[in-house]
Amino acid sequence: MKILVCISKAPDTTTKISFTDNDTKFNETGVQFIVNPYDEWYALVRGLELKESLGGSVSTITVGPAASEPVIRKALAIGADNAVRIDAEPQDAFAVANMIAAYAAENDFDLILTGKETINYNGSQVGGMIAAIMDQPYVSLATKLEVEGNTAIIERDVQGGKEILEVETPLVISAAKGMAEQRIPNMRGIMAARTKPLEVITPAASENLTEVSSYSLPPQKSEVKLVDPENVEELVRLLKEEAKAL
Amino acid sequence: MKTLVFVDSEDGHLVKSAAEAVFYASKFSSEVHALAYGEVDSSTLAALGAYGANAVLHHAGLNQADPVKLSRLVAAAVNETGANCVLFSHDFTGKAVAPMAAAKLKAGLVTGAVDYPDTSNGFVVKSAVFSGKAFAHYSVKTELKMLSLLPNSINIEQGSGEASVSAFDADLGDSRIVIKEVKKQVNESGPVLTEADMVVSAGRGLKGPENWGMVEELAKELGAATACSRPVADIGWRPHHEHVGQTGIAIRPNLYIAIGISGAIQHLAGVNGSKVIVVINTDPEAPFFKAADYGIVGDAFDVVPKMLEAVKKLNAA
């Protein structure tokens, strides 16, 4: 089983979000970057578990400048065999998908795994786009994945419940909660990660179909209105009459 | 603008976000075509006219949500209608189909739109990013625009009128995806969490799974769905599908009641789109109070039963 896991760099979940350059750039000052949790906890770890039970290899791929290398090394420390970095600034989902698809098309992977979305752009786009570009099936929001022979058996979240489906490989899957449990890299993994292969390649020619023209922040919440615990009826009255929420 | 709206259905009913998406499209389009599939009555589809649909294309033969076939269906419908904009709901089906359709048609896609597109200078869509902590204003550079609407982001109005419904039996080809089984989530009471107007959520402050009775009762009395925080799902007090937050599901109900949840930033990221937030917590320093509209500093075991009584009284009035 040859598995490719897409790894994205994301700001730590506790990051306070602000912008610079007239609200056109995310302010990275003091921000701690991590592997996007959906990529790490679910896609990467499930990929490693499949490799451990079925044999094969797990490669990671990241579109990003050299500043992405610490999170790529983290993915290697958790257990990926080798990594590829496409040397480009990720700006548009289609362009990113195009670059990854161009690499994947030359390397015959049985499975391409992504997280269900990144926690910074929340797009849920790249996986489906890779699949469409490569003319492969796409299964989104998978919560379970088993592989028997050439068949992937998947459970995924759908409207109103879960769906069980079977797809012959190769295919692209986006991973959601339930796929696997987070793994903490051990010292041996961290040491080994330093010498694992990290190949840097130039991006395939790609076009940005969208661009961020600016960012904005939600309006500040006004002060909370506290209600006396002895007067819960007042809360219900406020919810009905003032907030019109009941 | 001529807009094609992909509408999803479940058990013969259109999902709640279908009317929302059609209404949204009607606000910036001169013509709205809805695209439906599966076993849905013509009269149900025609009723989308009341939200602004002019016409509905219906592929009755396809009754499973195979994203490969659905993306081909969307491409065929764009061709059929000459649409220059395609709209999805940013829900389970939309997340599966929109990126495939966009890449196939090489259309710029913005997912998770929270407001109407700004067409004063190009086509700019405001979308929720950084897990609800900020917005990005995306400019779509292609002729064909694609976007998906975050459910419960706009207020809709029901007008009158019926849309014309016509069969659209495009050839969707083969797919390697074989859907074996669909397991419906059984909700004994209350609406589906992602579609609910009201949500009652609880966390570790409830001390144990045996204490959820009052949460469920309050939810039932309100007609609300139940939810929980991540630690509660992780220790198995509540099922994972109830976990809301950054790594669980994100919801945007009109009313979110948080009981015994401290309000870690990761939890807030999943609920900060809620219109009204009520927090009940014993700790006045709980960060959740900073994100709340209304709060009670008090013991859930005292406050929740009283709230249940007050809601019962209101419902009886």
Image (cartoon, rainbow, N blue to C red):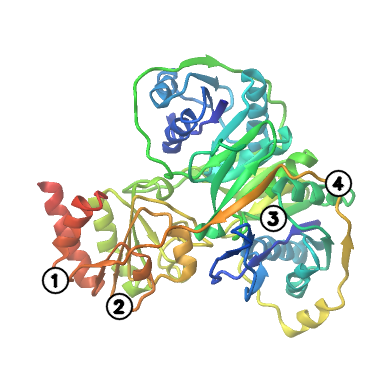
C-alpha gap between disc 1 and disc 2 = 16 Å
Which chain is home to disc 2? B
Q: Amino acid at mark 3?
A: Thr
The reply to the same-chain question for discs 2 and 4 is no
The residue located at (57%, 55%) in the rendering is A215
The quadrant in which residue A30 appears is bottom right
Query: Where in the figure is residue A18, as x and y percent of width and height?
Result: 56, 65
Alpha carbons under labels 3 and 4: distance apart = 22 Å
Position of B102 relative to A87 (above/below): above
Q: CA distance from mark 2 to mark 4?
A: 55 Å
Regarding residue B181, the answer to whether it shows in the image is: no
Element class at badge 2: loop
First in residue order: circle 4 vs circle 1: 4
Q: Position of residue A162 (x, y in %)?
A: 52, 47
What label does residue A205 carry, if any?
A: 4
Q: Quadrant of residue B50?
A: top left
What's the residue at 30%, 66% (across, down)? A224
